[in-house]
Image (cartoon, grey):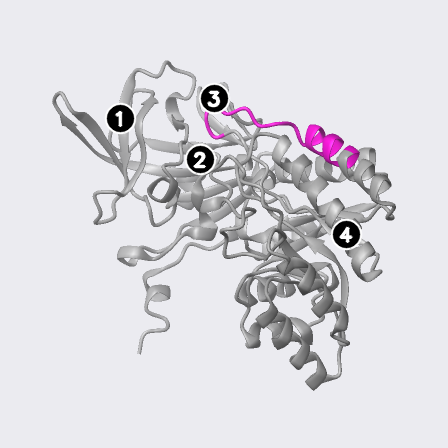
């Protein structure tokens, strides 16, 4: 199996976090998101321990909420001592409703509205990551109006093209996010922030992309950012205390994927930051990292009930399930690959090659093409693995499909984290 969250029990059934997938489907229905809580907690602890080991504890792990956001995940990561990266008023609200400490929230986004900024300031969000000068002016005016001060970071584009899908690259100059280094825009933003009395410029942020396997782009970004902090000191006299290096660490979706270990990333990045800071003659900053996918992605699976099998001789066989792009749009968006397992025969040979199709009224509503699975028929429960990230969080009500429930499993025991939507929920806001 591609993750330690998945195994096969004595009945030959797939288990997720020690719970029998067939029993979960029978109790909670399908489609169903299932997450292994212990795997999530282990990932949180590995990130924290890697910071302590290679960076002397002068750092903080922030969970990237956009990967999977609900009240229960905030309770879990708060319990593990993490902060959280939030990107909307809705994510802030969810975190606060879960009792997450507002001071450990970092508010990102390239187009924060005035209402969202006001909500963040009023509720004591610890740090706002400013993306552009319009936002800086908007925030400064809001703070002057309310008589408050606010810690901020500036989001910088380090000019690094991560080797990943074009939709999820964010560090190059042609990106909607952040201030560019190459044009001098970033240094001007530093000067503007330093001159804005109500904001306290604490440091810099960068993020180069998502689902990155190679450590080198992260190491390169760390070096570029540390050098820029040195330039800032020389040009303005400011010694910034925080360097947020973002997230984007890849996970294994299929057998061929080979992501670097968390520890390998932190060891090389820490060495680069220390080396560059010594060279620049600046203090070693507090380092923040923002893992999301690599905390929850491999801990999750989605369970479906198989409906129809449609064989087109000489072309392909369609296996249709009771979900699809409404609960997992990543194949339609990125061509993302997944491993699928027939839960009742998880240990048997994969003898069938199928295209897994969803039930939406779209020809492109697919979850996989050329997928190798065990023998399968109508009524079987199919698991698509490694769906803990960017599945529930990107789900929609397309075709008026209710969003699935979310179940959290710990020690083989399941509990409901998010209720399944009903038809009544679909029309709740209709007039």
Report how far apart the C-alphas of labels 3 and 2 lie in the structure: 26 Å
Q: Vertical placement of 372 versus 139: above or below?
A: above
Q: What stretch is highlighted in magenta?
A: 253-271
Residue holding disc 2 = 23
- Tell me, yes or no, whether the two marked residues, 4 and 2, touch with CB atoms within 8 Å: no
In this rendering, which labeled residue sits more in front, label 4 or label 2?
4
- Tell me, yes or no, whether the two marked residues, 4 and 3, touch with CB atoms within 8 Å: no
Label 3 element class = loop
Where residue 175 appears, as percent x and y from the top left, is: 50, 52
Residue 354: assigned label? 1
Label 4 element class = helix
Report how far apart the C-alphas of labels 4 and 3 lie in the structure: 43 Å
Q: Vertical placement of 310 versus 414: above or below?
A: above
Residue holding disc 4 = 231
Where residue 32 appears, as percent x and y from the top left, is: 42, 44
Mark 3: give few (<14), some (14-19) or many (20+) Cα within 10 Å.
Answer: few
56 lies left or right of 287: right
Report how far apart the C-alphas of labels 1 and 4 lie in the structure: 55 Å
Residue 255: assigned label? 3
- Tell me, yes or no, whether the two marked residues, 1 and 4, touch with CB atoms within 8 Å: no
In this rendering, which labeled residue sits more in front, label 2 or label 1?
1
């Amino acid at each position: 199996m591609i993750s330690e969250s998945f195994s096969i029990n004595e009945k030959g059934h797939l288990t997720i976090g020690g719970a029998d997938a067939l029993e979960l489907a029978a109790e909670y229905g399908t489609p169903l998101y299932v997450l292994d809580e212990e795997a999530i907690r282990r990932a949180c602890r590995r990130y924290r321990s890697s910071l302590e080991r290679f960076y002397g504890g002068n750092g903080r792990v922030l969970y990237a909420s956009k990967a999977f956001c609900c009240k229960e995940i905030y309770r879990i990561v708060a319990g593990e001592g993490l902060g959280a990266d939030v990107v909307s008023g809705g994510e802030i609200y969810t975190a606060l409703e879960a009792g997450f400490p507002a001071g450990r929230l970092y508010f990102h986004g390239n187009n924060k509205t005035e209402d969202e900024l006001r909500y963040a300031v009023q509720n004591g969000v610890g740090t706002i990551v400013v993306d552009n000068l319009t936002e800086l002016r908007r925030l400064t005016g809001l703070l002057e109006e309310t008589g408050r001060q606010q810690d901020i970071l500036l989001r910088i584009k380090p000019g690094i093209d991560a080797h990943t899908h074009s939709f999820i690259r964010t560090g190059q100059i042609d990106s909607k996010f952040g201030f560019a280094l190459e044009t001098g825009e970033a240094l001007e933003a530093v000067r503007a922030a330093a001159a804005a009395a109500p904001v306290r410029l604490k440091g810099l942020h960068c993020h180069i992309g998502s689902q990155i396997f190679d450590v080198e782009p992260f190491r390169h970004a760390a070096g570029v950012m540390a050098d820029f902090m040195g330039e800032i000191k020389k040009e303005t006299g400011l010694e910034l205390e925080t360097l947020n290096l973002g997230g984007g660490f890849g996970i294994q979706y299929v057998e061929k994927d080979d992501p670097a270990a968390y520890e390998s990333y932190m060891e090389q990045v820490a060495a680069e930051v220390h080396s560059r800071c010594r060279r620049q003659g600046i203090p070693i900053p507090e380092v923040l990292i923002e893992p999301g996918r690599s905390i929850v992605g491999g801990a999750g699976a989605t369970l479906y009930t198989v409906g129809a099998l449609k064989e087109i001789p000489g072309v392909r066989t369609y296996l249709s399930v009771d979900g699809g792009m409404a609960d997992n749009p990543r194949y339609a968006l990125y061509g993302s690959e997944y491993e699928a397992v027939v839960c009742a025969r998880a240990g048997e040979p994969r003898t069938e090659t199928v295209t897994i199709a969803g039930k939406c009224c779209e020809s492109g509503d697919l979850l996989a093409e050329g997928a190798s699975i065990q023998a399968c028929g109508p009524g079987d429960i199919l698991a698509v693995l490694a769906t803990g990230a960017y599945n529930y969080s990107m789900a929609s009500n397309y075709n008026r499909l209710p969003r699935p429930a979310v179940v959290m499993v710990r020690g083989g025991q399941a509990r409901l984290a998010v209720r399944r939507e009903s038809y009544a929920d679909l029309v709740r806001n209709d007039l």
